[in-house]
Image (tube, rainbow, N blue to C red):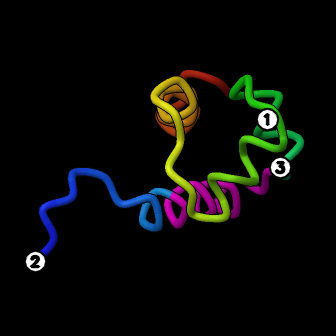
Amino acid sequence: MSDALFDPGQFRAMVAYQMRARGKSQHQVCGEAGLTRATLCRVLAGKSPSVETYLRIKRWIEGGAS
């Protein structure tokens, strides 16, 4: 059992799932969430996001940005 509080692979899967479910391209997500494409690509590659990036994506997932 891992004691890690954050799993970047699981976060990547959640972001990818939300993109597919909403039919959104990377370009669309970046515009709606206020991210650069490079930042989103790092997240989708399973890299740990910064706190700012995490919060922007979390807000997008929760519907704070449409």
Return the residue nearer the eye: 40 or 3: 3
At x 84%, y 42%, the residue is 37
Compared to 44, does 55 lie above or below? above
How far across and how far down the image is residue 45, in percent?
66, 64
Q: Which residue is mark 2?
A: 1
How far across and how far down the image is residue 42, in percent?
69, 53
Assign the C terminus to one quadrant of the image. Answer: top right
Q: Which secondary structure, mark 1?
A: helix
Q: CA distance from mark 1 to mark 2?
A: 34 Å
Compared to 34, does 61 lie above or below? below
At x 31%, y 52%, the residue is 6
Q: CA distance from mark 3 to mark 1?
A: 6 Å
Q: Residue furthest right?
A: 27
Assign the N terminus to one quadrant of the image. Answer: bottom left
At x 79%, y 51%, the residue is 24
Q: Which residue is mark 3?
A: 26
Q: Which residue is mark 1?
A: 30
Give amino acid for label 3: Gln
Q: CA distance from mark 2 to mark 3?
A: 33 Å
Give the magenta range: 12-24
* Dot 2 alpha-carbon crowd within 10 angstroms: few under 14, some 14 to 19, many 20 or more: few
Sequence order check, earlier mark of 2 and 3: 2
How far across and how far down the image is residue 30, in percent?
79, 35
Q: Which secondary structure, mark 3?
A: helix
Main SS class of the magenta portion in the image: helix
CB atoms at circles 3 and 1 under 8 Å apart? yes
CB atoms at circles 1 and 2 under 8 Å apart? no
Tag shown at residue 43? none
Q: Which secondary structure, mark 2?
A: loop
